[in-house]
Amino acid sequence: MNRVERLLSSPLGALLARPWFNRVALHALKHWFFPLSRLWGAADEARGAADRFFESVPMTPDRRIEPRLTRALARFERLRAAAVLADERWEAAFFGTNEPGDATLQAMERARLNARVRLNQARRHFLFLRRHPAVRPVRWEVPAPVEIAAIYARMLKDPAGPFEVPDPLPPVTASKKFRAASGQDYWLRFASPSQRMNDVVYARVHEPVGVSNPPTLIFLHGIG
């Protein structure tokens, strides 16, 4: 049981599972997480340049805050570079030709997750801009109805078509396996069958040890 599960199953978890928590959470999302995420995204696009950051927010360049912003962007870039390096090492360890030991794979997985957590936590470096009038919780880019109609024209004509199994199936690559708390974990990857996404799909697989023909449970979400 992880820390979140222990929290939710504790008396404090029962206190959180009340309607008041929804109001508090929504307020925090609107006034803290979403604005800071917009600034985080602008920092990712800026690649360390203050002018590109101002353009991405978007906000009028303010030379008074530029020294502090430049320092924040430099910290962000260091964290981003560390996360990219951890991803590259993880990719080489899990899908490369070498045969690292189980301890190495576990260490690579922890390093990748920790680097990404630190990068996500870089939102805090932009707290000084959270209340800036130019920073909005959401940067709306709503496509016109005609664009949506063009994107989903096929689905409107054949609603079941996009949900059918691709034929032929894309080749699936399995990573090396490593020991987990109650079994073994590994990754599957394959080219996305979606022409719009045009990326690589990754799925983490957990298999219990010593269980004959275990059932398959697919856990996912629809965000994005």
Image: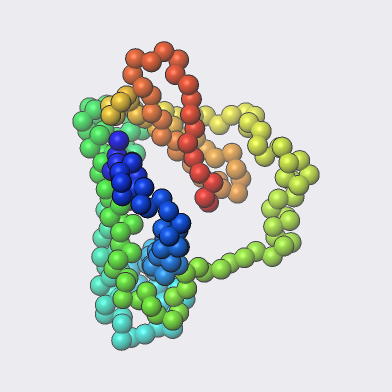
Way the structure is coloured: rainbow
- The residue at 52%/29% (across/down) is 171
Quarter of the image with the N terminus is top left
- The residue at 71%/37% (across/down) is 161
16 to 4, vertically: above or below: below
- Percent across and percent down for residue 116 are 32, 51
- Percent across and percent down for residue 212 are 41, 13
Q: Residue furthest left?
A: 103
Q: In this view, does 117 lie to the left or right of 30?
A: left
> In this rendering, does residue 89 appear at all?
no
Q: In this view, does 168 lie to the left or right of 63?
A: right
- Percent across and percent down for residue 157 are 78, 44
200 to 218, vertically: above or below: below
- The residue at 40%/83% (across/down) is 61
> In this rendering, does residue 195 appear at all?
yes
- Percent across and percent down for residue 46 are 39, 68
- The residue at 76%/47% (across/down) is 156
2 to 184, vertically: above or below: below
Foreground residue, 176 or 21?
A: 21
Q: Residue furthest top?
A: 212
Q: How many labels does the image show?
A: 0
Q: Is residue 87 left or right of residue 198?
A: left
